[in-house]
Image (cartoon, grey):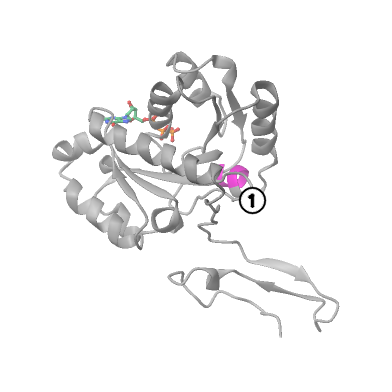
């Protein structure tokens, strides 16, 4: 299974992956692909954490906004994942870490089977309310660094409640690496999702938003049409469609 980890800059994506590797490397065959814009910093961090054979951690240097490489053109990431799968087959789990991006960045289902969106309490208690496709529709929302709540004046329980309310029943984990019970909850979710994937019951979803795009169609008076997939998501804002097919 390929598992994406996305979220704004510094919310704790690399640390979460290090924690997962620490907890799962004994029972699963793991590999990690990291994405940074101009460096291989995240891969170096994970290698130096000593949680996985360094060769199982491969960096992609996007040279562009992180979402470009995880949803618009996933080629570089797919090649990195496929190289790892070829070198270490059979792998149970490949984790792909996005570079830190904004609230709209999500993975294409062409790259990952499931995805985690990571926020942290230090980014402000109102971030969940600001919403976005990852917050609302990623397979799992993690509200990270809950231990910092008292120091930054954030009501963690309220933030988590708002996350649950925004997600229509999808799961939320309130996480701190200093709270073993919360790490247990994260690990349990990963194992459960992996079991569902192996049983053929897990369907990769596109949290969106899908960029407006053009379909060539000779029958259409304009030679084709541009549209969005807003209607795929009941709660997505409507009205952005341009020239829907007749
Ligand atoms: N207090 C606290 N700090 C944490 C926790 N998880 C991560 N951090 C710290 O948060 C900072 C950012 O963590 P990273 O894992 O580098 O975050 P990231 O999302 O990978 O960052 P980018 O790749 O730059 O977007 C580091 O200083 C971590 O030590 C946590 O549970 N509690």
Residue holding disc 1: 72
* Main SS, magenta residues: helix
Q: Is residue 137 above or below residue 88?
A: below
Q: Position of residue 213 (x, y in %)?
A: 68, 65
Query: Which of the 4 image quarters holds residue 216?
Result: bottom right
Asked if residue 105 lies left or right of residue 174, the reply is right
Decide if residue 44 is in sight here: yes
Secondary structure beneath dot 1 equals helix
Q: Position of residue 136 (x, y in %)?
A: 40, 58
Residue with the most extreme front position: 199
Q: Residue at left 20%, top 34%?
A: 147
Q: How many marks?
A: 1
Magenta-colored stretch includes residue 199: no
Q: Quadrant of the C terminus?
A: bottom right
Q: Is residue 30 above or below residue 175?
A: above
Magenta-colored stretch includes residue 67: yes
Q: Residue at left 13%, top 38%?
A: 150
Q: Which residues are magenta?
A: 66-70
Q: Is residue 2 above or below residue 210?
A: above
- Residue placed most toward the observer, 75 or 10: 75
- Residue placed most toward the observer, 246 or 23: 23
Q: Residue at left 26%, top 54%?
A: 126
């Amino acid at each position: 299974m390929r598992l994406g980890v996305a979220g704004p800059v510094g919310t704790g994506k690399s640390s979460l992956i290090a924690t997962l590797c620490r907890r799962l490397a004994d029972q699963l065959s793991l590999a990690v692909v990291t994405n940074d814009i101009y460096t291989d910093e995240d891969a170096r961090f994970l290698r130096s954490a000593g949680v996985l054979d360094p060769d199982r951690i491969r960096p992609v240097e996007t040279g562009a906004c992180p979402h470009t490489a995880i949803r618009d053109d996933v080629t570089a990431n797919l090649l990195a994942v496929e190289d790892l799968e070829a070198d270490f087959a059979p792998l149970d789990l490949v984790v792909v870490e996005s570079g830190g991006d904004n609230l709209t960045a999500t993975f294409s289902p062409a790259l990952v089977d499931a995805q985690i969106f990571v926020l942290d309490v230090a980014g402000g208690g109102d971030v969940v309310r600001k919403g976005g496709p990852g917050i609302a529709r990623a397979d799992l929302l993690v509200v990270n660094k809950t231990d910092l709540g008292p120091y930054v004046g954030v009501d963690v329980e309220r933030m988590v409640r708002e996350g649950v309310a925004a997600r229509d029943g999808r799961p939320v984990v309130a996480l701190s690496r200093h709270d073993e019970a919360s790490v247990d909850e994260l690990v349990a979710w990963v194992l459960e999702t992996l079991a569902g994937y192996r049983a053929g019951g897990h369907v990769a979803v596109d949290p969106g938003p899908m960029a407006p795009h053009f379909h060539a169609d000779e029958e259409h008076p304009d030679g084709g049409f541009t549209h969005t997939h807003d209607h795929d998501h009941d709660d997505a804002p409507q009205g952005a469609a341009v020239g829907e097919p007749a």
